[in-house]
Image (cartoon, grey):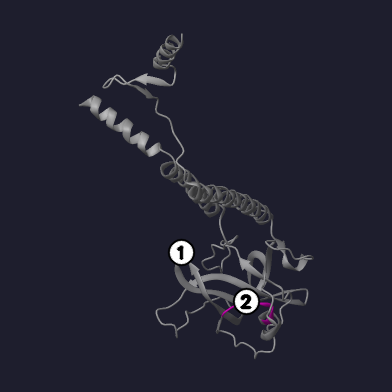
């Protein structure tokens, strides 16, 4: 009675089910191709620790892009308002549009190591005096950028009107002076400086030592402006995010090729397709 059971078991095992197919070449059953995990725990642990890190860095760059875009929207909103007369200014806020009536003095400086479109040059800082009803105010104006000459020892010529004129721009905060900078000797006008801070403003006896004015591009005495409103544009943050996400996707692909038999399955499928075509 045991022999029939054994024969029946052999016949049952020989019946193909949903996971086995008869090979056309040998007639033997072969399992359907499927991705199988190859034991490579160190590589897998490394990849799946890096994967969420890369995704997190990508999401962080996306958030930074949103924050920078919000900052730019707020700045554009302020700059789109009508400029106010500088004499009517009560509370100074960054990017507040202002208008001044007065004249330039011969006190100007070359702010060193400033670039535009990859070219090295200077930003020209010049004192502007505004008078109204006998009250005199002194403001430091950043007129914009001009290229440096071929020789370091030669500073470019600065021209300006000697008569009264109207200028427009927006308020911008000056850097606070370092403690060791306050006791230095005064800086001579028409010379090269390395930074714009409140120490220079105090030396020039400005009305608001913590602020200066950046000229608008449409102002008559403006040089090359193209003021950078943020240190990194939202587009760059989005590009960085795309790079992090691409690295995360590449890591998954590399893990599939190294820790599974996916590469072998692809090769077998390609060989079978080539054999059929021939």
Q: Mark 2 falls on what kind of element? A: loop
Position of residue 276 in the picture relative to residue 239 (left or right): left
Q: Quadrant of the C terminus?
A: top left
From the image, tell me which residue sits under label 2.
196
Q: What residue is disc 1 on?
A: 117
> In the rendered image of this protein, does residue 220 appear above or below residue 151?
above
Q: Quadrant of residue 163?
A: bottom right
Q: Could you say which disc has been placed on residue 16 in the image?
A: none
Of residues 207 and 57, the one drawn nearer to the viewer in this rendering: 57
Count of all numbered marks drawn on residues in the image: 2
The CA span between labels 1 and 2 is: 22 Å
Residue 151, by quadrant, is bottom left
139 left or right, relative to 18: right
Between 24 and 266, the one nearer to me in the picture: 24
Query: Please, which residue is most extreme toward the bottom here?
Result: 185
Front residue of this view, candidates 202 and 34:
34
Q: Which residues are magenta?
A: 194-199
Q: Give the class, few, some or many, for how many residues have Cα within 10 Å of label 2's Cα (few <14, many ≥20).
A: some
Considering the numbered disc 1 on the image, is that residue within a helix, a strand or a loop? loop
Q: Is residue 6 above or below residue 108?
A: above
Q: Residue at x 30, y 32 (%)?
A: 270
Can you give x and y, in whole percent of width and height, for residue 35 in the image?
44, 33
Q: Earlier in the sequence, mark 1 or mark 2?
A: 1
Q: Residues within 10 Å of mark 1 (few under 14, many from 20)?
A: few
**Is 15 positioned to the left or the right of 25 in the image?**
right
Q: Position of residue 12 (x, y in %)?
A: 43, 13
Residue 219 inside the magenta-drawn segment? no
The spot of residue 230 in percent (x, y) is 60, 60
């Amino acid at each position: 009675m045991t022999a029939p059971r054994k024969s029946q078991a052999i016949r049952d095992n020989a019946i193909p089910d949903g996971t086995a197919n008869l090979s056309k070449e040998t007639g033997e059953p072969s399992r359907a191709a499927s991705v199988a995990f190859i034991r490579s725990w160190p590589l897998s642990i490394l990849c799946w620790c890096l994967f969420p890190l890369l995704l997190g860095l990508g999401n962080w760059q996306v958030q930074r892009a949103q924050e920078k875009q919000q900052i730019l929207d707020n700045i554009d909103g302020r700059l789109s308002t009508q400029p106010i007369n500088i004499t009517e200014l009560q509370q100074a806020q960054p990017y507040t549009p202002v208008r001044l009536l007065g004249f330039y003095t011969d006190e100007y400086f070359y702010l060193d190591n400033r670039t535009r479109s990859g070219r090295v040059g200077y930003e020209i800082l010049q004192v502007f005096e505004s008078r109204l009803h006998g009250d005199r105010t002194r403001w430091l104006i950043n007129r914009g950028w001009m290229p440096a000459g071929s020789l370091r020892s030669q500073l470019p010529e600065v021209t300006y009107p000697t008569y009264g004129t109207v200028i427009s721009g927006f308020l911008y905060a000056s850097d606070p002076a370092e403690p060791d900078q306050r006791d230095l000797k005064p800086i001579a006008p028409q010379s090269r400086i390395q930074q714009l801070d409140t120490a220079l403003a105090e030396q020039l006896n400005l009305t608001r030592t913590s602020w200066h004015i950046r000229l608008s591009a449409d102002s008559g005495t403006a040089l090359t402006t193209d003021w950078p409103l943020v240190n990194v544009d939202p587009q760059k943050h989005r590009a960085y995010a795309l790079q992090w996400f691409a690295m995360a996707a590449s890591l998954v692909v590399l893990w599939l090729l190294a820790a599974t038999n996916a590469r072998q399955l692809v090769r077998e499928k390609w060989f079978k397709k080539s054999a059929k075509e021939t």
